[in-house]
Amino acid sequence: MALSKPDKKTILKELEEKGKHKGILTAKEIFEAMGEVDFYPEEFEKL
């Protein structure tokens, strides 16, 4: 059984929660999360 990729909103929610908990997100953490799904810069504003 193939594992499905998490959707964009889930990834962003996880990043948001991680940032709230730690108080900061590194560029590396953001770029690693973005690598899990295909993000386009203009989509960030929509989400």
Image: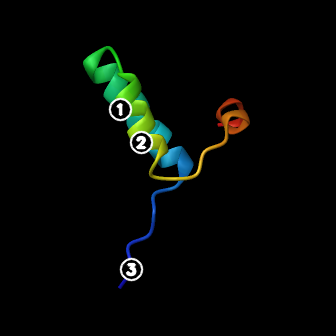
Count of all numbered marks drawn on residues in the image:
3
The amino acid pointed to by label 3 is: Ala
Whether tag 2 and tag 3 are in contact, CB under 8 A, the answer is: no
Give me the residue at 38% from left, 73% from top.
3
31 left or right, relative to 24: right
Residue that mark 1 sits on: 29
Q: Is residue 21 above or below residue 30?
A: above
Residue 45 percent across, percent down from the top left: 70, 29
Give me the residue at 41% from left, 24% from top.
27
Q: CA distance from mark 2 to mark 3?
A: 20 Å
Q: Secondary structure at mark 3?
A: loop
Circle on res. 2? 3
The amino acid pointed to by label 1 is: Glu
Give the mark nearer the N terminus: 1 vs 3: 3
Q: By what rule are the colours in the image chosen?
A: rainbow
Q: CA distance from mark 1 to mark 2?
A: 6 Å
Whether tag 1 and tag 2 are in contact, CB under 8 A, the answer is: yes
29 left or right, relative to 47: left
Q: Is residue 21 above or below residue 2?
A: above
Give me the residue at 34% from left, 16% from top.
24
Whether tag 1 and tag 3 are in contact, CB under 8 A, the answer is: no
Residue that mark 2 sits on: 33
Residue 15 percent across, percent down from the top left: 40, 33
